Amino acid sequence: MKKIPIKSWALDDRPREKLLFKGKTALSDAELVAILIGSGNRQESAVALAKRILLSVNNDLNTLAKLSVEELMRFKGIGEAKAIAIITALEFGKRRQFEERMSISKIRSSTDVAKIMQPLIGDLAHEEFWALYLNNSNKVLAKYQLSKGGFTATLVDVRLLFKRALELSAIGVVVCHNHPSGKLLASTSDIELTKKIKQAAITLDIKLLDHLIITEKAYFSFADEGIL
């Protein structure tokens, strides 16, 4: 089958030109991906290839963002450079979402914490443990990754957690970690670690406001459940 050159397509089928003349919101997800990859293969256009890639993940951009370079390269017409372009664009989108949520001026509830941290760790395939450091108005002074683990438990240095708090003159701390399994139940080790952190916080006159377990779609708050 002979492939029709992109320059011969109608304007609505040419994503770059469509973006210029109609604006970015006029483009479908497939058309945006087509711009990223630039060209298709001998059998299909960039748009057709983009549609096929999206169909493989049920048109879910969050699932697409989890694909590795190797997984994307399984599609005919996607080489290493194109795979990297897709991953880079989706990572930029994720970071933009995170920065927008970091603009939350004040932590008022566990929901505010989840809005900040979910884009950062909710969809990871490994565990990470983070702390948010707050001032006396519950404004976020800083976020800090304390540990990065494998697919099971992650080790946390409580001394490092509070060393950073003292450096920032933080009044309160919220700790968070993700469960790649998607399960929201607090494990025995999660509960013991929380007790350890809380005891250290009391000694240093710093408030441990909450501990959140975060997954891609939901979260569990120790404070909300009354077990902090």
Image (spheres, rainbow, N blue to C red):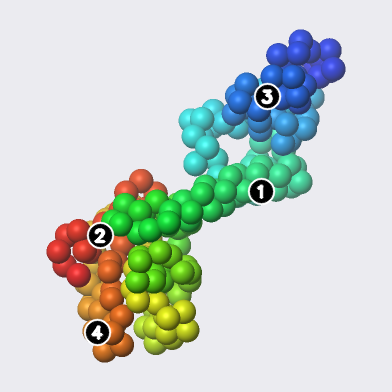
Tell me the element at label 4: helix
Question: Can you identify the residue that label 2 sits on?
Answer: 221
Which mark is first along the chain, 1 or 2?
1
* Closer to viewer: mark 2 or mark 3: 3
Question: Can you identify the residue that label 4 sits on?
Answer: 202
Question: Can you identify the residue that label 3 sits on?
Answer: 23
Q: CA distance from mark 1 to mark 3?
A: 22 Å
* Closer to viewer: mark 4 or mark 1: 4
Which mark is first along the chain, 3 or 2?
3
Question: Can you identify the residue that label 1 sits on?
Answer: 88
Q: In this rendering, does residue 2 appear at all?
A: no
Residue shown at 46% from the left, 79% from the top: 168
Residue 216 disc label: none
Rendered location of residue 96, percent (x, y): 57, 48
Is the C-beta separation of discs 2 and 3 under 8 Å?
no
Q: In this rendering, does residue 26 appear at all?
A: yes
Q: CA distance from mark 4 to mark 1?
A: 43 Å
Which mark is first along the chain, 3 or 4?
3
Q: CA distance from mark 4 to mark 3?
A: 54 Å
